[in-house]
Image: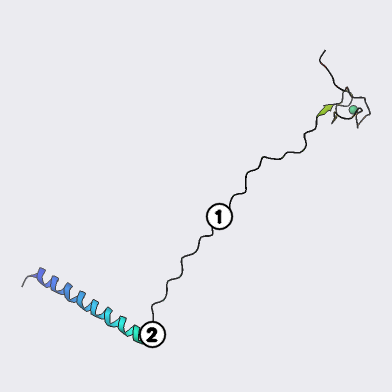
């Protein structure tokens, strides 16, 4: 009897025993009522929140400012006089 044949027979025997054991164990568990521990449910990956619509960056009301010739402060071009020093602002300055 060759060694290889022994190994094969041994493997087959172990395989048969294991299958038989598994079957009887399954029947036993079925009758007893023991069930294998249920696998935990897969973690539900929360869906990423929908990205907010990209709105155009709302900048504040653009106001024309002019620099006072006297004190150098930037004041609104809509006013006639500087808020800082009262220097009259050149309205509608034109090049020339
Ligand atoms: Zn000024």
Depth check: give the residue in front, 44 or 74.
Answer: 44
Relative height, residue 39 to residue 28 (above, below): above
Residue at 11% x, 73% y: name it. 6
Q: Residue furthest right?
A: 86
Q: Residue 32: x and y, percent?
A: 36, 87
In the image, taking residue 92 as reference, residue 16 lies left or right, namely left
Query: Mark 2 CB in 8 Å range of ligand 1?
Result: no
Extreme residue in the bottom direction: 32
Label 2: few (<14), some (14–19) or many (≥20) C-alpha neighbours in 10 Å: few
Question: Which type of secondary structure does the marked residue at label 1 adopt?
Answer: loop
**On the rendering, which quadrant does ligand 1 occupy?**
top right
Q: Residue at x 14, y 70 (%)?
A: 8
Taking the image as shown, residue 68 lies to the left or right of residue 58, namely right
Q: Earlier in the sequence, mark 1 or mark 2?
A: 2
Residue on which disc 1 sits:
48
The local secondary structure at tag 2 comes to loop
Residue 89 sits in which quadrant? top right
Q: Residue 33 has which mark?
A: 2
| Residue toward you, 74 or 55 | 55
Residue at 17% x, 76% y: name it: 13
Residue at 80 percent across and 29 percent down: it is 64
Give residue 35's position: percent from left, percent from top. 39, 80
Count of numbered marks: 2
Image position of 14 with respect to 58: above or below: below
Give the image location of residue 20, x and y in percent: 23, 80
Mark 1, other Cα within 10 Å: few <14 / some 14–19 / many ≥20: few
Q: Quadrant of the N terminus?
A: bottom left
How has the structure been colored for display?
rainbow
Residue most extreme to the left:
1
Mark 1 to mark 2 CA distance (whole Å): 41 Å
Residue 67 at x, y = what percent? 84, 26
């Amino acid at each position: 009897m060759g060694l290889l044949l022994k190994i094969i027979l041994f493997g087959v025997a172990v395989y048969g025993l294991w299958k038989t054991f598994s079957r009887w164990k399954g029947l036993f568990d079925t009758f007893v009522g023991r069930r294998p521990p249920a696998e935990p449910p897969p973690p539900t990956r929360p869906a990423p929140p929908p990205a907010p619509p990209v709105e155009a960056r709302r900048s504040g009301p653009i106001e024309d400012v002019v620099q006072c010739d006297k004190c150098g402060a930037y004041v609104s071009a809509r006013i006639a006089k500087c808020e800082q020093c009262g220097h009259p602002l050149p309205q509608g300055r034109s090049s020339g």
